Amino acid sequence: MGRTTKIAHFGAIFFFNTIFKGIVEWVLIPLSMKELGFLKTFIFTNLFLLSLGFFSIKLYDYYGKDCLSLENLKKSQDNKIEVEKGNNLINMILKWADKNPFLLSLFLSSQNPALTVLYYRYGHNLYNGFTGRKLILIFLRNILILSLYINTLLYLGLKVFK
C-alpha cells in the first residue's frame, strides 16, 4: 500500500469516525437519555467516548501518517521553529497551547478524545499509542468531564422542554 493510499484510508476512517460521533451525540444519546435516564446514558457516553478515542489512536498509529499535521506541529514547537498558520485545528492549538493547556485538552477531546493523546504524547512521528500514566489519566479525565457536560446539558434541556 503506497503513502497516498494509507493517508486516504486513514482520512476516510477519520471522516466516518466524525460522522459516527455526530450520530451518537445528536441521536443516540438524546434517545437513551429519554428512555434510560441520566446514569445509564452517562455510562453509555463514557464507554462510547473511551472506545472512540482508543480506536482512533490505534488507527492513527497503525497508518503512521500525519494527516492531521499534529506531528509536524509538535516537531516545529520542539525545535522552536515558527509554525505557519494552517488548518483551523492547528491555528487553535497555536493560540491556546501556552495560554491554557487544560482548556486546550478539553477542546481537543470534544472533537475526538484521541486528539489530546496525539498532541500531548512525548516525541513526534513515533506513533506509539498511550505513552505514560499521566497521559492516560488526562485522557480518562477529559472523557469524564465531557460526558458529564454533554449529559448534564441534555438532561437539563429535556427537563426544560418536557
Image (tube, grey):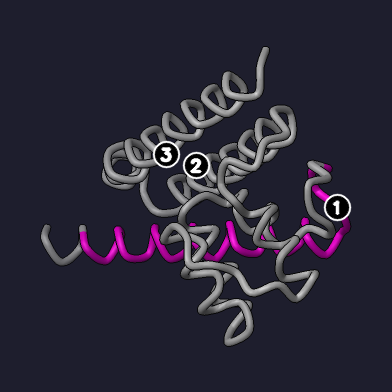
The C terminus, quarter of image:
bottom left
Quadrant in the picture for residue 144 = bottom right
The three-letter code of the residue at mark 2 reads: Phe
Which residue type does callout 1 highlight?
Thr
User: Residue beneath label 3, please?
Assistant: 18
Q: Give the range drawn in magenta.
A: 128-157
Q: Quadrant of residue 19?
A: top left
Question: Residue visible at 51% across and 27% down?
Answer: 13
User: Circle 1 is placed at which residue position?
Assistant: 131
* Residue drawn at (54%, 22%) of the image: 9
| Spot occupied by residue 140 in the image (x, y as percentages of width and height) | 68, 57
Would you say residue 106 sits in the magenta stretch?
no
**Marks 2 and 1, Cα distance to the nearest angstrom?**
26 Å
- Of residues 57 and 43, the one drawn nearer to the viewer in this rendering: 57
- Residue at the far right in the pictured view: 132
> For the residues marked 3 and 2, what is the alpha-carbon distance in whole angstroms?
18 Å
- The residue at which mark 2 appears reads as 44
Q: Do the residues labelled 1 and 3 touch (CB within 8 Å)?
A: no
Residue 156: image x %, image y %? 27, 66
User: Against 100, is 68 above or below?
Assistant: above
For label 2, the SS is helix
- Disc 3 is placed on an element classified as helix
Q: Do the residues labelled 3 and 2 touch (CB within 8 Å)?
A: no
Q: Nearer the viewer, residue 120 or 161?
A: 120
| Residue 126 pos. (x, y %) | 83, 45
